[in-house]
Image: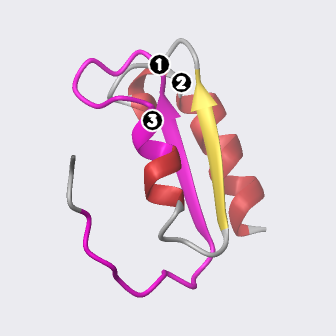
Amino acid sequence: MVYIPEYSKITSPTLIIWGDRDIALEKDLTTMSAKYVENVRIKHLPRANHFVHWDASDEVNQYIKEFVE
């Protein structure tokens, strides 16, 4: 069993963009991270790896643009 200490939740709007083919980090980390953020959006990119901004730059830019507008 993994011990996860209690922290205050992040209250700022947060965007997580995740490459589902990441070989370093599992995509379940997105939902685990979301537990600590009150206002989170998660975008999965099925064909991208760890470096989503290289693998799917157009999609990443679009998600960021929508998020900040």
Amino acid identity at mark 2:
Ala
User: Which is closer to the viewer, label 1 or label 3?
Assistant: 3
Tell me which residue sits at (21%, 51%) in the image.
2
Q: Amino acid at mark 3?
A: Asp
Front position in the image: 15 or 57: 15
N-term-proximal mark, 3 vs 2: 3
| In this rendering, position of residue 12 left or right of residue 30 | right
Q: Residue at x 45, y 51 (%)?
A: 32
Nearer the camera: disc 2 or disc 1: 1
Q: CA distance from mark 1 to mark 3?
A: 15 Å
Q: Which residue is mark 3?
A: 28
SS under mark 2: loop
Q: Are the residues tagged 2 and 1 within 8 Å (C-beta)?
A: yes
Segment colored magenta: 4-30
Which residue is identified by label 1? 48
Query: In the figure, 8 relative to 26: above or below?
Result: below
Magenta portion: prevailing SS class: loop
